[in-house]
Amino acid sequence: MGTPQTNLNTGPHSGLNASLKASQVGLAATASNRQPTFLMCPPTHYEVNYVINPWMSGNVHRSSRERAAQQWDQLHAALRQIAQVLLVEPQPGSPDMVFTANAGLVRDGIVALSSFHHPERQGEEPHFRRWFHESGFAVCDIPRMTPFEGEGDALFEAAGERLWAGHGPRTRQDSHRRLTELWDVEVVSLRLVDPRFYHLDTCFCPLSNGDMMYFPAAFDDESQRKIEARYGRSKRITVSEEDALQFACNAVNVGRTILLNTVSKELCARLEARGFQTVQVELTEFLKAGGAAKCLVLRLSEMDVTHRA
Ligand code: ARG
């Protein structure tokens, strides 16, 4: 990926200097790093103690921190086999900080920092901001008026040429324009209509070979047409409702490896037939908060590095 020519002065809310370019910002621990790199947050303070999505209702104070720690360790260990994993320090009072995918969206040494929809998660913002700043990323703020929940709602296509961006339950569609401006990239907006799939990464997963896995019923008709127009039939891997509810689409794809919660044998076989190796990690404790593998991980390396591995 070349040096970005994007003007980072994205308005009065931007913390960025107009002339700042990613090439001048020390290229973030990772962008200059040619190995797949991700950010995770240990579940030290993880619990379900408020309800901001349907998965959490009925699960308040019902998660086991000990089991969560074991499951997180397994995911962390599995990811470390194939990538570098950096950690951000967990903060008391921010139980969902473990879901680092919501911290922001990274490209070219720049992070579009999330502006959470729910006050319950807004306290995470300064902690993530500090981490990105100290790690050498240029931080671009997204205004509070137009909530944006990072990689939870914005996923680059295989080679990074197009950005798929969800909106509805959390992210506001108006925030997508900022992403277009920031990276000069085509943004395709998708409307999420099923409250169980409240973030794009719960129901849509672009894969390294140009295929894509998704649960169509999570999108309105127009969005389904957009997806079909860009991914031919043979490229679309449709996931059953049962697998979707196991967070099958909430998968971390590094090269030919796919890390995900336990899903059906049938789905694994379909992915393997396309040349992927699947690694299943039981993540039941995190499902109680509405998250699984992908939510627990934020991509820091560029798409061509992450997907080429
Ligand atoms: N409890 C968290 C929330 O509702 C879960 C976040 C899941 N993250 C994700 N990338 N889908 O915000």
Image (cartoon, grey):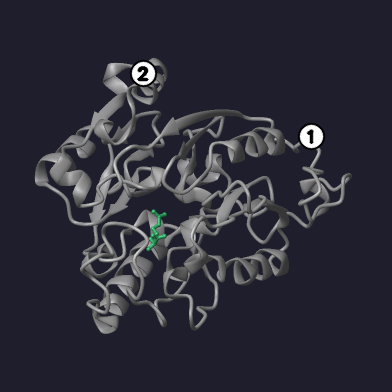
Direction from residue 37 to residue 289 in the image, left or right: left
Look at 27% across and 49% down and name the residue there.
196
- Quarter of the picture for ligand 1? bottom left
- Is 204 in front, or is 54? 54
Q: Amino acid at mark 1?
A: Gln
Amino acid beneath label 2? Arg
Disc 2 crowd rating (10 Å Cα; few below 14, some 14-19, many 20+) is some
On the question of residue 1 being in view, the answer is no
- Residue carrying label 2: 225
Closer to the camera: disc 1 or disc 2?
2
Q: From the viewer's perspective, is 126 left or right of 203?
A: right
The answer to whether residue 193 is visible is yes
Q: Does 138 sit above or below residue 229?
A: below
- Which residue is disc 1 drawn over? 5
Residue that protrudes farthest toward the right in the picture: 19
Q: Earlier in the sequence, mark 1 or mark 2?
A: 1
Across and down, in percent, residue 83 comes to 46, 58
Residue ID at (51%, 52%): 149
